[in-house]
């Protein structure tokens, strides 16, 4: 931690900060579980109180048709200072299988320098280091170098169903010059990195129906279409023999990696064996001629996430089923367009399935792939902040996942940069989630650094009158 | 009905017979539903009482670890008369979807010459016409021409899990010279037929597992094996491009049709459009170069009856699932051997699935295909009885289904002939099951005729001393 000012805060206030972290992590704000709705609200209220306590001037709970978001604002920066909006979320993933937790998920504890708790790194810890950076800076200087807005969502773990509407509705209050997303990770503690793209996602439930009723396989088997066979054929044909998504035209709009991205990809110390071990699989597979890092970050995919049909109980039932369903997801990369891909996929499915089989396709929304503008001044500021704290310039990474970041940038019309301190072994969404505390303290310092760097960079581009 | 003796009985006793039929059909003996266990027993008790009332000398409820069977015996035939065992079942299929019934399934009614009720044709009606033929014959003559045993199972609709053990345990009491199975159908009221083979069945639940946990598709998607994709490939490869089961060696032991069977197949007035309509499908498909009748009766099949894996709830979940399951059934025809097919299928699956994917195969028992010995005297007797009642010699049909008939013939070491009066539109296992009453009365006459014909045929082969 090379920022002496914030390093001192981390040291002197360590117990108080950790105490606040624990109090928040004790609240089981599981957005997917209706019985935890009150806890999600309690988490929002806790955060709102903490924002006021940290020195934000205006704090408000933003209601949605689902779980609430928290908005906090401090707007006392000098004239001409940029407005920065920090994004995170306060809801957490479910905890099953609960038996797999070595320590109860909502009784946070620090063991071996790791905070163990559901939500530690995803994403309460990453919100809190911003809050503490604000508190430290205000305590020391009485002001922040930028106008700061904090928007902390309560439904990220259930796909942010009301987030885009909230952004649109509150666009005026959320207006900003740059968005800092802190819900991601880096390669390793000694290999800092920042994300420059996230994959998009479209997904559909596809139903093939051949008859109105299950048929007796003794009477009809062998002479009537079996929708499970037709669905299996469809799924099989999603990929060609080289592991590529086989839909004609699917990858036409995929943009090649920039030179900087390609260099970063080559520089990444990626341990393929460790990745395989983390996944718990015996082998890796994907598109021929692509590295694992390309496959998970830079390439679009087709992935069946669920399939079912016919009889699924004990033993056997002698039927030819009437229908079969598959949930098919497509991860998209820049510059694929979700709407165009939905049309392409729907057309392909209908062309593949035999005439006379009813095809029903229900799309479950879509998220466009997101790309950071690395030529923007905010990106240079981020890189400097990370370099200061981690002692090394960040590599550029492409994130395989999809999130609300795309709609943030699009709806608020601002560049998005990623400050994230997660590590590959953090077990997000899994039992025994952890946050490495060293990364938390560095995140705190980097957040404070970033505010300064953003103020300086904006000033350099457009000097205040 | 050209048997005047029994025709007179059908006429004079019509109301009483129908009344008994209704009383039995009112009992919801659904063997698959634990909450109906008492009803299955009530059905057995009702039948046992009815057997005593019809004149059987010895009646016993055979207990099993599941639902009970009913055994009834009359052994007063002249010396040298054959012993005939009649098989049927008293349990019925579930009734869902209940809303699809035009009339409550357990409130039997005769409409348009059809008895509408669950179990009407499958199989209570077909057991009862034997009972009434016995009653009529005993009432008229005081004796039967054969020693008659009745074995009426209570678990046929759940796959007869305890039937073979019961046969083995009671083999001495069940010993017989010929077995008459009455749980099948014929082509049309004016095209009588009898089954000469039933397909066998082996079935397995196949599980492919790639990891111990579902993986986040953002982190891992595109670089790890997806078991749903591998399962889809496996299912797709069950058949070749010509619709044949593609497993090498699978059909090696399939015996060609006999000349008589081939002639019967050619003579069958089969309405393919009606068959398609009954199945509720838009088109028929199966092995290239085979007729629909061959496909459903004379050819082995591979049919996936159920499949599932991954996320199957609302919307989408961004995972690469850890495992995928399919229930795969294979209908077998003479002379395929279930044990050999199980080995062949298991070996094939393991050879098809990529190394490193765990394969689990659980077999759910097996039923060998059954073939009637059409050169046996009992078959000639059956053909004469049918010809007498329907006015036309029966065509030879192959049944697509599988049943306990194979174990009957094998364990009791006796030839099996099929007297069955069901019709293609009887909606067995479906809502609005029916029995055409004309077929019931003919069945009654044919059963009585058959006892006489069997006695005469046995006498001709092996004259009583």
Image (cartoon, coloured by chain):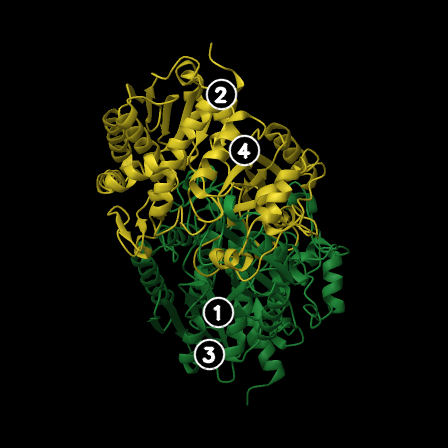
Chain colours: A yellow, B green
Looking at marks 3 and 1 on the same chain, the residue that comes earlier in the sequence is marked by 3
The answer to whether tags 1 and 4 share a subunit is no
Q: Is residue B429 visible?
A: no
| Residue at the limit of the structure toward the bottom, as seen here | B465
State the separation of the CA atoms marked 4 and 2.
45 Å
Q: Quadrant of residue A147?
A: top left
State the separation of the CA atoms marked 3 and 2.
110 Å
Q: Nearer the viewer, mark 3 or mark 1?
A: 1
Q: Quadrant of residue A73?
A: top left
State the separation of the CA atoms marked 2 and 1.
95 Å
Up-down: is B280 above or below B52?
above
Of B81 and A54, the residue lying toward us: A54
Name the residue located 61 percent from the left edge and 50 percent from the top edge.
A232
Q: What element does badge 2 sit on?
A: helix
Q: Is residue B385 visible?
A: yes
Residue B422's disc is none
Of A410 and B354, the residue lying toward us: A410
User: Along the horizontal axis of the image, is B313 left or right of A272?
Assistant: left
The quadrant the N terminus of chain A occupies is top left
Residue denoted by label 2: A458
Name the residue located 36 percent from the left edge and 29 percent from the top edge.
A152
Label 4 marks a residue whose chain is A
Label 1 marks a residue whose chain is B
Q: Nearer the viewer, mark 1 or mark 4?
A: 4
Label 3 marks a residue whose chain is B
Up-down: is A223 above or below B281?
below
Residue denoted by label 3: B77
Q: Are marks 2 and 1 in contact (CB under 8 Å)?
A: no
């Amino acid at each position: 931690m090379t920022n002496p000012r914030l390093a001192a805060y981390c040291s002197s206030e360590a117990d108080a900060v950790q105490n606040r972290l624990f109090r928040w992590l004790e609240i089981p704000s599981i957005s997917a579980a209706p019985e935890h709705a009150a806890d999600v609200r309690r988490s929002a209220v806790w955060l709102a109180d903490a924002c006021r306590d940290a020195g934000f001037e205006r704090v408000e709970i933003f209601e949605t048709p689902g779980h609430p978001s928290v908005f906090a604002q401090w707007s006392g920066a000098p004239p001409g200072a940029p407005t920065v909006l920090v994004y995170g979320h306060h809801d957490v993933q479910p905890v099953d299988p609960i038996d797999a937790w070595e320590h109860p998920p909502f009784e946070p504890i620090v063991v071996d320098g790791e905070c163990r708790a559901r939500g530690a790194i995803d994403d309460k810890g990453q919100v809190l280091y911003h809050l503490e950076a604000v508190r430290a800076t205000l305590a020391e200087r009485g002001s922040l170098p930028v106008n700061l807005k904090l928007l902390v969502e309560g439904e990220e773990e259930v796909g942010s169903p009301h987030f885009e509407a909230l952004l649109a509705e509150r666009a005026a209050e959320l207006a900003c010059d740059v968005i800092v997303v802190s819900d991601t990770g880096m390669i390793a503690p000694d290999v800092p990195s920042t994300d420059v793209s996230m994959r998009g996602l479209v997904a559909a439930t596809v139903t093939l129906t051949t008859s109105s009723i299950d048929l007796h396989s003794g009477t009809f088997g062998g002479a009537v279409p079996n929708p499970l066979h037709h669905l299996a054929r469809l799924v099989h044909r999603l990929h060609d023999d080289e592991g590529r998504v086989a839909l004609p035209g699917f990858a036409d709009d995929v943009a090649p990696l920039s030179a900087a991205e390609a260099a970063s990809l080559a520089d990444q110390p990626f341990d393929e064996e460790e990745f395989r071990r983390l996944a718990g699989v015996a082998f890796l597979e994907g598109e021929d001629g692509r590295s694992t890092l390309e496959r998970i970050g830079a390439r679009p995919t087709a992935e069946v996430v669920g399939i079912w049909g016919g009889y699924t109980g004990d033993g056997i039932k002698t039927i030819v089923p009437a229908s079969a369903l598959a949930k098919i997801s497509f991860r998209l990369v820049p510059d694929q367009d979700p709407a165009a891909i939905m049309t392409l996929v729907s057309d392909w499915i209908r062309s593949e399935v035999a005439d006379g089989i009813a095809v029903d396709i229900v799309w479950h929304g879509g998220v466009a792939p997101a790309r950071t503008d690395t030529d923007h001044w905010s990106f240079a500021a981020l890189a400097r902040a990370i370099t200061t704290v981690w002692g090394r310039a960040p590599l550029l990474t492409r994130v395989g996942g999809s999130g609300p970041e795309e709609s943030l940038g699009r709806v608020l019309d601002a560049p998005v940069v990623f400050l994230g301190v997660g590590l590959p072994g953090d077990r997000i969404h899994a039992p025994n989630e952890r946050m490495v505390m060293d990364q938390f303290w560095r995140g705190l310092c980097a957040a404070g650094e970033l505010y300064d760097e953003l103020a300086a960079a904006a000033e350099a581009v457009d000097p205040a009158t």
